[in-house]
Structure formats: C-alpha cells, structure tokens
C-alpha cells in the first residue's frame, strides 16, 4: 500500500485543472494505488519457502480479478486518451478558425491596397502626360 489510511493526501485545485481530471477520476486512481496487497501473492516477491499453492479454481478467480482490473485500467487510459484527443481537436479547430479570420483580413487588406495601387498608377500616368505636355509647351516657348 502506498498511502496509509490516516495520511492526508493534499493537492491543489490548479493541478487538478491542469490534468483535466475530475475528483471522481482522482478517487479512482487512488483506489487503484491503494489496493490492498496480498503478501502471499505471486507478485509480492515473497516466493520463498512460504509460497502458497492455489487450486485451479482459486487461480481462475484470481486471474479473472486481475483481468477485470487490467480491463478497468485499460478503459480508463482509453477514456483519458479520447479526452486528450478531443481537447486537441477543439484547440486545432479554434486555431484554424483564427487563421481563417486572419487570412480573410489579409486578403481584404490586399484587395484595398491593390485598388489604391491601381489608382496611384492611373494618377501617375496622367501626371506624366501633363508633364510631357508642359515640356512640349516650354520647348515651344523657348524656341520662339
């Protein structure tokens, strides 16, 4: 057992929010951690001379319990994984929406600048024509 029954387990709310775990999920994790350990279990390391021999039925029951716990842990991991992927999808959708908005604004700005640029080019052509006319008039006046 990792925690004593009389030990107070403290955690801050911010760490719970950061991991996106509900209080029920945390309780479930603690129940997995605090499972009572059987000192005679084959995995306890006390497999010396005091090794207990289990009957076939007992082995089946222990295996079924072990399989149930494994399946429960697997379901829990799958649930966490799905929540993480869902959160990532939501973040990416929001980011995609923001990028589309920025692209739309940039394209609108580009259109405005293109219209202004075309207007300035037209004005430049008109001014060049006037300047050319003025040079011609000046040339005519100086040649007389």
Image (tube, helix red, strand yellow):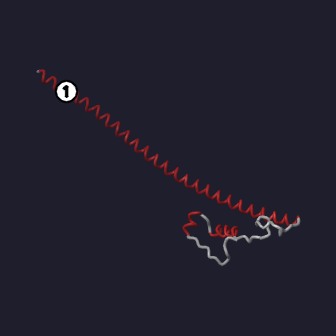
Q: Quadrant of the N terminus?
A: bottom right
Q: Residue at x 62, y 67 (%)?
A: 22
Q: Residues within 10 Å of mark 1 (few under 14, many from 20)?
A: few
Q: Residue at x 73, y 63 (%)?
A: 72
Indicate left or right for 105 with 44 as reference. left
Determine which quarter of the picture holds residue 139: top left
Q: Residue furthest right?
A: 56
Q: Residue at x 25, y 33 (%)?
A: 127
Q: Residue furthest front?
A: 49
Q: Quadrant of the C terminus?
A: top left
Q: Position of residue 55 (x, y in %)?
A: 88, 66
Q: Is residue 66 above or below residue 110?
A: below
Indicate left or right for 44 with 100 as reference. right
Q: Is residue 132 above or below residue 43?
A: above
Q: Residue furthest top?
A: 143
Indicate left or right for 96 with 2 as reference. left
Q: Position of residue 33 (x, y in %)?
A: 69, 68
Residue that carries the numbered disc 1 in the rendered image: 135
Q: Nearer the viewer, residue 13 or 136?
A: 13
Q: Nearer the viewer, residue 49 or 37?
A: 49
């Amino acid at each position: 057992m990792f925690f004593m029954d009389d030990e107070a387990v403290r955690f801050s709310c911010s760490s719970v929010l950061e991991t996106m775990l509900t209080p029920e999920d945390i309780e479930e994790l603690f129940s997995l951690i605090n499972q009572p350990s059987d000192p005679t279990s084959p995995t306890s390391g006390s497999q010396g001379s005091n090794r207990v021999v289990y009957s076939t039925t007992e082995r089946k029951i222990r295996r079924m319990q072990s399989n149930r716990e494994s399946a429960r842990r697997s379901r829990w991991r799958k649930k966490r994984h799905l929540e993480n992927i869902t959160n990532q999808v939501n973040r990416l959708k929001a980011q995609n929406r923001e990028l589309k908005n920025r692209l739309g604004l940039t394209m609108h700005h580009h259109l405005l600048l293109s219209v202004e640029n075309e207007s300035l080019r037209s004005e430049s052509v008109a001014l060049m024509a006037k300047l050319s006319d003025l040079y011609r008039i000046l040339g005519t006046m100086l040649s007389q």
